[in-house]
Image (cartoon, grey):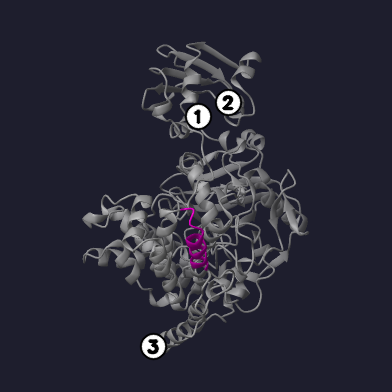
C-alpha cells in the first residue's frame, strides 16, 4: 500500500463523525486528497509565472469595468485573494492555475503584437498594422474589449481598428465585437471581419438554437453566480471567469476557406490554416512570418480542453484535433519564436514551442487511443473513464492538466463520438426516468431514513461519489426532503473542493448553492438580445423559433406564411402544419404566390417584436408591418410557440 494511501486512510479514520452536514469547510478526507496533489506535482515551479508576467506594460485603471447601463462587466480586483499557498478548500493545482490566470493587463508579446489578458475568460490580441489595429478575438462582452482597446491606444498610441479576426465560433471570442467595431464601420468597409468558413452557422447553432439550455448550463460550467472566494469560485481553468453583459455579433465580411489562405492585412502577412472540427466546428489558426509568431486560437492552450463541454456542444474529434496540432508542429514549430493563443500566456523559444505542441498533440491522441483500446476490449464508457490513467508528460507539463477538460470526462466524450450514449448493456438502453428510478431505489434501501443513513455513512467515510448518488436519489424521490438536500449540498461541496478542474469545481459548488438557496439566479450573460438576433440570417432565426413549436398548442390546419424583410433582402417561407413548423429560405425575387399569408417587415422591427419591445397591433398601426392574405395565421404560429424557461431546475426534479 502506498504511503499516500496509508496517510489518507489514517486521516479519514481519525476524522470526526458529522452528525449534521458541514458547510464551507474542508473535511479531513478533502484535506488529505488535496495534500496528495501538492506532494505529487511540481507546484512550486515558477517558469509559467515568469511567462505570465513577461512584457507587462500597463493595467486598466480603476476597480471596475462598467457596461453602458452602469452594471459591472468586470472587477479588476475580484481575484486579489489568490495569493500564497492553496487553502484546504481548493485543489493546489487549480489554485496555481488560478494565480496564473489572474495576472492581468496589457502585455507586449513581441514588438508589434500585444495582448489584453485577465479581463475576461479569453484574451484579446492586438497586432499593429501599417495604419491601424488588427484585433483578434474581442472577448465575450463589449465593455472589456472597449476598455482594453482604450488602454492600448493610451499606452502605445492611437490607432483605428482596421480588421478583426474571429478565430472560432464561440461567444467569448466574438461577443465583444461592439466594443471595437460598429456594424456601420463594417458595412462601410472601414473594418474587415475575418472568420473561418462556417462561422456564422456554427455560432448561431450554439447561441440561438440551443441558447436557452446552454446559457443555463453555462451557469454551472463557469460558476457565473458563485461568490468569488476560497469556498466559491476561484477560476475556470481556461481563464478566471466570463465578463458580464450582452453578447454582440457582427457577421464576417470574409471567410477563410477550408484549404487555408494567405492574406495581407494592413501590411501584415497571415498564413491561415483551417482547424475546424477540433475545439470548435469552425476554427482557424495562423502564422505571422514577419514576427515568427504562431497563434493557436483555442486549439492549443495551457490546459487540456473539453472534448464535450459541460455546457453542451457537438462532440469534438480528438483524432483530428491531434492531427491539426501535429500539422502546426510540422509547419510552424521549428520557425516559431513565440506561440500565443486566445487563452493564457504565450510560450517563447522555438524548442519550448515544439515541446508544448508535442505535448498538446499527445494529450488528445492519448485520450483518443486509450479510450478506443479499452472499448475494443469490451470496456464500457464508465469503466474506461475510471481506468484511463494519464500520460507521463502530464506529471511535468501543467499545460496539459485537467483544469478545463478532464481525462475522465473526455474519455466519455470519445466513447460517445464513436458509439453514442449507450454502453451496450441492455439494462441501460431504456432505463426508468430519474424521479421514478429514485423512488424505487429509496424504497429498495428500506425507506427514507435508512437511505439517509447509508448516505451519511458514505460521507463520513470520505466516499463522496457514493454519498452523492444516494443523496441525489433521495432528493429526486422527494424534493421536499430538506435533510437529503443539505447532505447532498455538503457532498457536492467536498467534491468541488477536491476538483483540479475549475469546471468540475464550479458544477459541484453551483449545485450545492442551489440546493441550499434555491434556483433564483439571473444569468449574467445574455445571447438572446437584439445585437445577436440582428446579426443572424432570417432562416436561422426561424429555425431557432421552430424548436419552440408545440403541437399541443397548434390551433387549426396551418398554412404557408411568407416573411419578406426588404432591408436585408431576405425572404423566408414557413410551412406551418399541425405537428411541424418548417422554415425555408426563399429567393427574395420570388413572388408570394402559393402562400396563405404575406408579411412585409424590416428585420429591425421584427427583432423588436421578438424582444417584446413592440406589438403586432402597433406595427400594423404605424405601417411598419404589412400583412396580406390570412392575417390570423401569424398569430396562430406565435401562439403555438412555447415560452422559454431560462432558469429550469437541475439539482432537483
Magenta span includes 488: yes
Cα distance between the residues tagged 2 and 1: 10 Å
Give the secondary structure at mark 3: loop
Cα distance between the residues tagged 3 and 2: 66 Å
Q: Residue at x 43, y 23 (%)?
A: 574
Quarter of the N terminus within the rendering: bottom left
Residue 440: image location, x then y, percent:
32, 55
Q: Is residue 594 above or below residue 376?
A: above
Front position among marks 2 and 1: 2
Q: Nearer the viewer, residue 203 or 230?
A: 230
Residue 451: image location, x then y, percent:
39, 65
Front position among marks 3 and 2: 3
Residue 514: image location, x then y, percent:
55, 56
Q: Residue at x 45, y 33 (%)?
A: 548
Q: In the image, which disc is placed on residue 620?
A: none
Q: Which secondary structure class fits the magenta region best? A: helix
Q: In the image, which disc is placed on residue 606?
A: 2
Cα distance between the residues tagged 1 and 3: 62 Å
First in sequence, mark 1 or 3: give its number. Answer: 3
Residue topped by disc 3:
2
Bounds of the magenta segment: 479-493
Q: Residue at x 67, y 66 (%)?
A: 79
Residue 603: quadrant of the picture: top right
Q: Is residue 347 above or below residue 425?
A: below
Give the secondary structure at mark 2: helix
Residue topped by disc 1:
538
Query: Residues at badges 2 and 1 in contact (C-beta under 8 Å)?
Result: no
Horizontal side, residue 1 vs residue 52: left or right: left
Q: Residues within 10 Å of mark 3 (few under 14, many from 20)?
A: few
Amino acid at each position: 500500500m502506498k504511503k499516500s494511501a496509508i496517510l489518507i486512510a489514517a486521516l479519514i479514520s481519525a476524522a470526526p463523525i458529522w452528525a449534521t452536514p458541514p458547510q464551507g469547510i474542508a473535511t479531513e478526507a478533502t484535506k488529505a486528497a488535496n495534500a496528495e496533489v501538492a506532494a505529487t506535482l511540481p507546484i512550486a515551479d515558477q517558469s509559467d509565472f515568469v511567462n505570465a508576467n513577461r512584457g507587462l506594460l500597463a493595467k486598466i485603471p480603476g476597480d471596475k469595468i462598467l457596461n453602458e447601463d452602469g452594471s459591472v462587466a468586470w472587477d479588476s480586483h475580484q481575484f486579489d485573494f489568490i495569493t500564497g499557498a492553496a487553502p484546504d478548500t481548493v485543489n493546489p493545482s487549480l489554485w496555481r492555475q488560478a494565480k496564473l490566470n489572474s495576472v492581468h493587463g496589457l502585455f507586449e508579446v513581441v514588438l508589434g503584437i500585444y495582448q489584453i489578458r485577465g479581463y475576461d475568460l479569453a484574451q484579446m490580441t492586438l497586432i499593429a498594422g501599417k495604419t491601424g489595429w488588427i484585433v483578434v478575438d474581442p472577448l465575450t462582452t463589449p465593455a472589456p474589449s472597449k476598455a482594453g482597446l482604450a488602454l492600448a491606444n493610451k499606452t502605445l498610441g492611437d490607432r483605428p481598428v482596421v480588421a478583426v479576426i474571429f478565430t472560432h465560433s464561440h461567444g467569448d471570442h466574438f461577443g465583444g465585437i461592439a466594443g471595437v467595431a460598429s456594424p456601420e464601420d463594417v458595412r462601410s468597409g472601414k473594418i474587415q471581419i475575418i472568420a473561418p468558413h462556417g462561422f456564422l452557422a456554427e455560432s448561431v447553432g450554439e447561441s440561438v438554437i440551443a441558447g436557452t439550455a446552454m446559457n443555463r448550463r453555462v451557469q454551472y460550467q463557469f460558476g457565473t453566480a458563485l461568490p468569488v472566494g476560497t469556498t466559491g469560485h476561484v477560476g475556470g481553468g481556461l481563464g478566471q471567469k466570463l465578463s458580464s453583459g450582452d453578447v454582440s455579433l457582427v457577421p464576417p465580411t470574409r471567410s477563410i476557406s477550408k484549404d487555408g489562405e494567405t492574406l495581407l492585412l494592413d501590411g501584415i502577412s497571415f498564413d491561415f490554416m483551417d482547424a475546424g472540427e477540433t475545439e470548435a466546428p469552425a476554427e482557424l489558426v495562423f502564422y505571422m512570418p514577419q514576427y515568427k509568431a504562431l497563434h493557436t486560437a483555442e486549439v492549443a492552450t495551457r490546459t487540456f480542453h473539453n472534448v464535450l463541454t459541460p455546457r453542451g456542444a457537438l462532440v469534438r474529434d480528438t483524432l483530428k484535433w491531434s492531427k491539426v496540432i501535429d500539422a502546426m508542429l510540422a509547419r510552424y514549430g521549428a520557425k516559431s519564436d513565440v506561440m500565443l493563443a486566445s487563452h493564457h500566456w504565450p510560450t517563447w523559444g522555438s524548442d519550448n514551442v515544439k515541446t508544448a505542441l508535442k505535448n498538446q498533440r499527445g494529450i488528445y491522441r492519448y485520450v483518443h487511443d486509450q479510450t478506443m483500446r479499452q472499448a475494443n476490449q469490451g470496456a464500457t464508457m464508465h469503466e474506461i473513464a475510471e481506468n484511463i490513467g494519464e500520460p507521463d508528460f502530464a506529471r511535468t507539463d501543467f499545460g496539459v492538466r485537467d483544469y478545463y477538460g478532464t481525462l475522465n470526462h473526455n474519455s466519455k466524450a470519445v466513447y460517445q463520438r464513436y458509439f453514442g450514449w449507450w454502453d451496450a448493456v441492455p439494462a441501460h438502453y431504456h432505463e426508468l426516468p430519474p424521479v421514478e428510478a429514485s423512488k424505487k431505489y429509496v424504497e429498495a434501501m428500506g425507506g427514507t431514513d435508512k437511505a439517509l443513513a447509508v448516505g451519511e455513512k458514505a460521507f463520513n467515510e470520505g466516499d463522496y461519489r457514493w454519498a452523492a448518488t444516494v443523496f441525489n436519489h433521495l432528493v429526486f424521490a422527494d424534493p421536499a426532503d430538506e435533510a437529503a438536500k443539505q447532505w447532498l449540498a455538503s457532498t457536492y461541496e467536498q467534491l468541488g473542493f477536491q476538483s483540479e478542474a475549475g469546471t468540475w469545481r464550479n458544477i459541484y459548488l453551483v449545485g450545492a448553492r442551489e440546493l441550499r438557496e434555491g434556483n433564483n439566479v439571473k444569468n449574467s450573460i445574455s445571447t438572446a438580445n437584439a445585437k445577436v438576433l440582428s446579426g443572424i440570417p432570417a432562416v436561422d432565426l426561424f429555425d431557432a423559433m421552430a424548436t419552440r413549436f408545440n403541437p399541443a398548442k397548434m390551433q387549426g390546419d396551418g398554412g404557408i406564411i411568407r416573411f419578406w424583410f426588404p432591408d436585408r433582402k431576405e425572404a423566408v417561407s414557413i410551412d406551418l402544419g399541425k405537428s411541424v413548423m418548417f422554415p425555408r429560405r426563399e429567393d427574395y425575387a420570388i413572388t408570394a404566390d402559393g402562400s396563405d399569408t404575406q408579411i412585409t417587415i424590416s428585420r429591425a422591427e421584427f427583432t423588436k417584436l421578438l424582444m417584446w419591445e413592440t406589438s403586432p397591433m402597433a406595427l400594423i398601426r404605424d405601417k411598419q408591418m404589412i400583412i396580406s392574405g390570412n392575417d390570423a395565421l401569424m398569430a396562430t404560429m406565435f401562439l403555438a410557440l412555447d415560452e422559454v424557461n431560462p432558469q429550469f431546475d437541475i439539482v432537483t426534479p
